[in-house]
Image: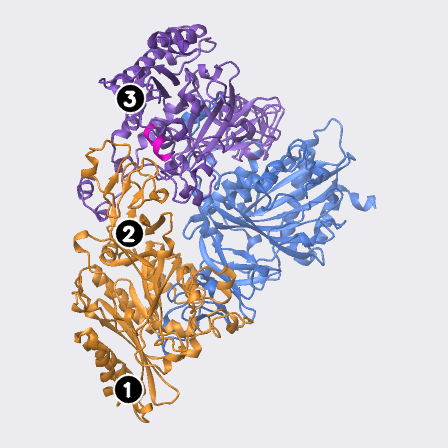
Chain colours: A orange, B purple, C blue
Amino acid sequence: MTKNKKAAHMPYGAYHKTTIPAHDPELASTDPGTPMGEVMRKQWQPVCMSEQLTDVPKAIRIMGEDLVAFRDRSGNIGVLQRHCSHRGTSLEYGIIQPKGIRCCYHGWVYDVDGTILEMPAEPKDSKIYETVYHGAYPAQERDGLVFAYMGPPEEKPAFPDFDSYHRPDGNKLVPMSAFHTCNWLQVYENIMDHLHVGLLHDPSMMSVEGVDASEIKDMDYAAPMGFTEQPTLDWVPTRNGNGMCFIACRRNPDQQTVWVRILETIFPNYLQIGCTFPSVRTSRRSQTVWTRWHVPVDDENMLVIGWRHFNDEVDPLHLGREEDVGLEKLDFLGGVVGGRSYEEGQRAPGDYEALTSLRAIAVHALENSGYSDTGVYMCRKLLRDLVQGKTPSHKSLQLQEGDENRLHTYSQDSVMNLPKEPGKDDHEAMRGLGQQILQIMQEADGVPSNNREEYIHARFDELDGGYLQAAK
Amino acid sequence: MTKNKKAAHMPYGAYHKTTIPAHDPELASTDPGTPMGEVMRKQWQPVCMSEQLTDVPKAIRIMGEDLVAFRDRSGNIGVLQRHCSHRGTSLEYGIIQPKGIRCCYHGWVYDVDGTILEMPAEPKDSKIYETVYHGAYPAQERDGLVFAYMGPPEEKPAFPDFDSYHRPDGNKLVPMSAFHTCNWLQVYENIMDHLHVGLLHDPSMMSVEGVDASEIKDMDYAAPMGFTEQPTLDWVPTRNGNGMCFIACRRNPDQQTVWVRILETIFPNYLQIGCTFPSVRTSRRSQTVWTRWHVPVDDENMLVIGWRHFNDEVDPLHLGREEDVGLEKLDFLGGVVGGRSYEEGQRAPGDYEALTSLRAIAVHALENSGYSDTGVYMCRKLLRDLVQGKTPSHKSLQLQEGDENRLHTYSQDSVMNLPKEPGKDDHEAMRGLGQQILQIMQEADGVPSNNREEYIHARFDELDGGYLQAAK
Amino acid sequence: MTKNKKAAHMPYGAYHKTTIPAHDPELASTDPGTPMGEVMRKQWQPVCMSEQLTDVPKAIRIMGEDLVAFRDRSGNIGVLQRHCSHRGTSLEYGIIQPKGIRCCYHGWVYDVDGTILEMPAEPKDSKIYETVYHGAYPAQERDGLVFAYMGPPEEKPAFPDFDSYHRPDGNKLVPMSAFHTCNWLQVYENIMDHLHVGLLHDPSMMSVEGVDASEIKDMDYAAPMGFTEQPTLDWVPTRNGNGMCFIACRRNPDQQTVWVRILETIFPNYLQIGCTFPSVRTSRRSQTVWTRWHVPVDDENMLVIGWRHFNDEVDPLHLGREEDVGLEKLDFLGGVVGGRSYEEGQRAPGDYEALTSLRAIAVHALENSGYSDTGVYMCRKLLRDLVQGKTPSHKSLQLQEGDENRLHTYSQDSVMNLPKEPGKDDHEAMRGLGQQILQIMQEADGVPSNNREEYIHARFDELDGGYLQAAK
């Protein structure tokens, strides 16, 4: 590499740069027994959509493990190892039972926890009933997604419930899932890579001459929101390094108010994205438009799977289209899911093309990183600390079964009053404001859930002199 | 595995069972030089159907060897190594000659034994004529199948002729072949796995709720025959361990007669299947409805290839359909050949789905075997002894070229008189009967072919007091 | 192999010949750092057709390197490493700029030499501008082909210009390209394998009975030209072993004149083919109908890419069809490009079938070579010497940038007067004539370009007594 790097400092120097180093398995690999795989298995992960569970089982592959998911006729969700414990026939050909699933070959029936319920070709007193369980993972459904816990049984955490799922009242979680032909990490990192948004998603820059960007479905959303203005940016570790966020501040045209956007990722593979509609420039405390997990199928394939939130806070003008959200589809951010033709992808590339083409597994050793990559490199550093066991736990993520407090996310968008002052460094002013917003969000962790919103709004009002009230 | 096995004894324990051990190459692998490959090469094997030999050569792959099969214009069958001995062009692009086949590149012509007949671009006195033979295997056709002998030339056996091919008079051998995307062994073992028949092939158990089993082509045959009644079963090695059979006895509804079914496999990969029609419950000495070989294409693909027998003994009511037998088709046992859609396979799985989905090569080390697997495990044990050279030969399989005696199979179905006696263990009684039937079949080996049927019938009559005659 | 070879000397001996040795990587492999790859990289290579450069970039793969080719909107040709130097997004999704290409992810713009022109998400004074060049190769277009130089920058040669491109006046170079699913070498060698021409390309021999050869598009050209007559042949190294040629002499039916055909390959992967129309039997000094390079895509795929020459010297009767020359098409030599169905290939095999079916990489160790392979083996020997550094350079290939002299090829077809003399060995006479022709061509190297044709014609006239003039 040294030779390569040095020789790279010349025009027409490709001859000296043909070595392709290995990828970074410590972060990228999630098969059983890998460090990142162990970390990821200790959290509930969505593994498919509820609509994929029909009257026949669904073969799925998660973190390199071949599994089968099904809903038995009593409504219980099973996520089982794919191959029957008897001789190995795939349970994707199993027959769903009133309780459990029956292997088609010799009729063994497994309950969703792996208990053998029937072995019709074995004696009724077979010892196998006592000695064998089929490999099963705890599973449950929520709002159209199927979740499994694939970690050590004794470390199973409570199923996390985030505040954003419940606000505002009437928020609707609409499930979606998008298969990607690449490693999970390069899609996950992409959020902390905030500066690409104003570039990749600016069709005036990123479409072929002659292509009318406004006619490409859902491509033309970044400019109306103002994403093409470069923000004042900070990247900040959160929760002792168990998460991180970016704080992006952009001044509104009124020169008086500032749009503060915070997006938080919670490690290893969770994140929530805020408003993606122009209303963001006038709203306060709108929170999540898209909750997503980044779930490895195996090292070279992954799912972006989660919920699109429909509510008046993130989309007061009802610009979203629920019918365009689901399996392999999303109603904004054209090109974020695959399925377009190669030619379409070339003419108006989106996240899908930019990310899946970073090789099947991106090669970090070949990168030349700059300012725009600050968040991505911080993300990798924090993930590496996490898999190496260097990251202390944080009370904000410790939820006990039955606990009424919900987890809070710091993701949010708010317009704050901060008149531009001549002679003052406006970037520093905005940066300070953003950090104060994050600080208020973090301090709100200590406030009981039912008072939390009130508390935050009061602190925000205090911070900007009650601008919103005054404006009304 | 020990750790895995122990940890398996808990519900939701998949986390402790993610290791996938290797398959068993001693039995599964048949490439050149492998132990099982050597054993299999010492017998004639069918390699394709006659109808696949047209005016162009047929590229085939057998036991990992790339070959080409053809019928020259004199009618001679050639099975040659695929790549020309000169420079390597594939003979699948060769031109079939009045005698032999001509490579398209430089025109070398090979006879079916590998002799070079012409090298038009070489001098007429080229020494190559004397020093090079193209790699060829002895080949012949019989009843629509093409057979090759791929073993050491000096050990070539006579082409085996089984009694079942000739009985009753007028028996018609109709060829068929079905490609499977899995190892050969898991399909072969399936016959000694008799107990799956009443489960996998019972569509009332093995189809998705709402699917009308009677409407699925050829799926609904097991129940009318009574296969869904669990039989009294024995598994018995035959011919010093060069074969094995199961003896399945089921009592008829008259409580007086018993259906004795014997199916014999002859190692390493041959077997004959008996009657698959309801008439089996009243017949005597019906023998073979399907002769099959289990021929590896390579370690992860195989052919079930053989003959469907059409005769009045196995199908007195003429329920079979000859037009549905051939390349990738069979007229009973729905789902035994591939070609159905994935969804069809999920809704009404058959042997094809159950067997090909046992991974590409089944992993024996992950199995949890029970009573129903007794035959499968005996089969593997006997095959292992065979490849390790521990199995003595048996005179019943020693056929010399020109020998008029034919090989005999013990496969047969017979209804015998054995009234149910109150207070007596009926299973033991049936088991004893079954063993006597097998013993008579074995003793009949010493009887000349032309007297054998008479001898067997007499012994059967003696055994059950001439019940059939009396019934008439 | 010894055992194998010995055992091969028997009919039906395939059992002893199942070992498949490795291919010959010293000649076949061209990935970065391989000996042959290094040799090939030191010459300009065509990498795609100009028509493949549109308003979106073209992903190409050359010698195992993933690249992208494009023409920027100023008309400059770029051949860049495919993955962006920033984070690795494929530049096949890049947006072509007025100058250079813009990566779609963060908008970095690269000039065709790899200079970074823009990094919109980086500070304007980023040091990356000074320290990083993207991997680029020098590239240029000529007559519809795109060429790149992929070797060490300091050894870049002048772009070679051959005399044949310019003669006769008005010669038109029409580009073509044909993808092959095999190693490059087996397609390259095929030219020195002259004797296959009268066999593979004789449809009366190489088509299935019942196929009307004259109806197969472009298959029936060898017989009218007389290629099916076996020639008197010589194979001769040229230019100190940096090339080689065959000299094929065939007597015309008049028993007075002889057709002398010389085809020269220049190593490692260049060659020019002479006239492929019946007029060759009466012409003199017609030169090139097809200039081709044999460019590895990777070790198991390659391009035949070059120019079809249209001029009155090689095709005085205008039998060629320019509209049938281009991407995956050529207007003669049916079957030389792929794209036909498998069945068509079986019924009337062409070069494509004969060559691609020599395994993905031909296995030399399995060959049984004879007289017809003399040229192929000489070609391999000379290539091996070349990659091992044993071949001295030759002044005829040393062209300096700006040099007005063009490179000369020895390929040509000429009819010469050489009456058949009874009692004299006609083969020896023809062989002597052919060698004299080659000698004249070589001696003409020393003659300035503008006098060269005149010189050659005079020497030819001197050699055969001015036969042509007299005939007129």
Where residue C83 sits, quadrant-wise, is bottom left
Element at badge 3?
Answer: strand
Within 10 angstroms of label 1, few (less than 14), some, or many (20 or more) residues? some
Q: Which residue is mark 2?
A: A76
User: Label 2 to label 1, Cα distance in Å?
Assistant: 54 Å
User: Label 1 to label 3, Cα distance in Å?
Assistant: 88 Å
Q: Which mark is residue B234?
A: 3
- Dot 3 amino acid type: Asp
Residues tagged by mark 2 and mark 1 found on one chain of the structure? yes
Q: Toward the viewer: C239 or C109?
A: C109
Magenta part, dominant SS: helix
Element at badge 1?
Answer: helix
Return the x and y of residue C314 as percentages of the image width and height: 71, 49
- Judge from the rendering whether residue C316 lies leftward or rightward of residue A412; answer left or right: right
Q: Are marks 3 and 2 in contact (CB under 8 Å)?
A: no
User: Label 3 to label 2, Cα distance in Å?
Assistant: 40 Å
Within 10 angstroms of label 2, few (less than 14), some, or many (20 or more) residues? some
Q: Toward the viewer: B30 or C328?
A: B30
Mark closer to the observer (3, 2): 2
Q: Which residue is mark 1?
A: A429
Mark closer to the observer (1, 3): 3
Element at badge 2?
Answer: loop
Residue A373, magenta (yes or no) = no
How many labels were placed on the picture?
A: 3
Q: Are marks 2 and 1 in contact (CB under 8 Å)?
A: no
The residue stretch that appears in magenta = B193-200
Return the x and y of residue C279 as percentages of the image width and height: 75, 44
Question: Mark 1 — on which chain does it sit?
Answer: A
Question: Mark 3 — on which chain does it sit?
Answer: B
Question: Does label 2 or label 1 sit earlier along the sequence?
Answer: 2
- Dot 1 amino acid type: Ala
When the figure is inspected, residue C4 is found, relative to residue A294, above or below; the finding is: above
